[in-house]
Image (cartoon, rainbow, N blue to C red):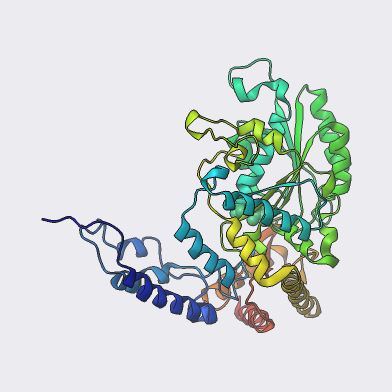
Amino acid sequence: MEMTHGDLPREELISQGRAILDWIATYLEHPERYPVLSTVKPGDIRASLPAAPPGTGETLETILQDFETKILPGITHWNHPAFFGYFATSSSIPGILAEMLIAALDVKAMLWKTSPAATELEEVATDWLRQMLGLRDGWFGITTDTASISSMLALAAARESRPELEIRERGMAGRTDLPRLRVYASKHVHSSVDKAALALGIGLENVVKIADDDQFRMRPDALAAAVAADRAQGYLPLACVATVGTTSTSSIDPVPAIAEICRRENLWLHVDGAYGGTLAVVPEFRYVLDGVEGADSLVVNPHKWLFTPFDCSAFFIKRPEVLKRAFSLVPEYLVTREQHEVVNYMDYGVQLGRRFRALKLWMVIRAFGADGLAERLRQHCALAKEFAGWVESSGDWELMAPVPFALVCFRYAPNGMSDTERDRRNEQIMHAVNDGGEVFLSHTKLHDRFTLRLSVGNIRTEKKHLALAWEKLQEAARVSS
Ligand SMILES: *Cc1c(COP(=O)(O)O)cnc(C)c1O
């Protein structure tokens, strides 16, 4: 029997590729055809699929039919314009097309040599982003998969900025000469910072949560006090993470005052602007990154609020040589002739093979332009403000936090209703609205009270989607009991 070799025929790419493009075009036009939140039960999708792989190849046509009938029901539609949960995100046409090219090229952007354009475009695209954010010259940009990894790299660099600890060579376990390393962050810091401490062997106990003020911002005086108390214990204050746009409420830690303390105390300052940092592309909102020039590193996520398909996080660092010292390890088979003249991005992290993310960031920035991106983010902030206005001017609802970006924290709180009862009602309202399938929002707890969150960030969200959310919320509140 003759074996078949090679890829599928070109005709399949053309015909099925066209079908997929058509599908995507219709999908992006009407994601509302689908319930925003998937309604399947745990195990449904798995049960609908064969447990064993097919022995012989199947046609793309059949596979795509199954995609429609079996996979799509289990999709929660992040690209749906009424997805207001967590932080709303979306991809965009230039980003989607870029992903096709990225898959076609299948580059591993690890060494300059393994695709000079991938490396140099990463330098260019991250530098464009730096300029759009209003940052000074001298930041080195790297794309990573997520802010979680970017923040882990930041803490790894912070640790390597103390070479006298010899952690790179000797590790941390079994040593009596190492003090506890301490990392400071507000109590609203993203859990990825705790996870970075887990991964790096710093330990959860050593992520010190600093008290916040009445607007959910880290208190610099409490930070200074925590550092002093730790020094008195013989601990080593290593780093501080300030957040621009916290996950619960999008509050902004006072970076200038924190930077001043970090400078004085010799702490590495990492700014987590995964959500909020991108708003600095809007000139009148540039102040959200005030003080960041006093930081050592910064993360912003183009895959969160800059219409770049997941994944694309942008990590900026002032002293890339420290990160390189933490991670560079060049086995003989990866030695290249030009390694001292070029950037080899594999030197700046854990991964060897790296996705060619720069292409999509570059295509997104070019297709919309700095002004076009700014205009869209400005619009999202205006929409969120408008929604916040509806909440404020209705008698029965209240805002639970300021709205510095495009996230509204609010709850149903009619007069005379106890807080416990309000908690119960708001949870009920959220589930009722989400079960309706037309709108999705998520929640948090503020001052220990159940709080609804509505985040605007999808490129296709319009006022009518917010009006629909408001209508559904009021309806659910009316029938709640
Ligand atoms: C979303 C978010 C993260 C995590 O982002 P990933 O890219 O999914 O890891 C971290 N920090 C903040 C403030 C965020 O909003």
Where, quadrant-wise, is the N terminus in this rendering? Answer: bottom left
Where residue 458 sits, quadrant-wise, is bottom right
Indicate the position of residue 296 as horizontal and vertical percent values. Answer: 77, 41
Q: Nearer the viewer, residue 293 or 34?
A: 293
Residue drawn 77% across and 75% down?
Answer: 382
Can see residue 421? Answer: no
Report whether 291 appears left or right of 156: right
Q: Nearer the viewer, residue 426 or 304?
A: 304
Residue drawn 56% across and 71% down?
Answer: 79
Indicate the position of residue 420 as horizontal and vertical percent values. Answer: 68, 62
Q: Nearer the viewer, residue 202 or 169?
A: 169
Report whether 333 appears left or right of 283: left
The residue sitting at the top extreme is 176
Indicate the position of residue 388 as horizontal and vertical percent values. Answer: 77, 74
Where, quadrant-wise, is the C terminus in this rendering? Answer: bottom right
Identify whether 67 is placed above or below 156. Answer: below
Residue drawn 84% across and 44% down?
Answer: 294
Can see residue 431? Answer: yes
The residue sitting at the front extreme is 337
Indicate the position of residue 113 as horizontal and vertical percent values. Answer: 54, 44
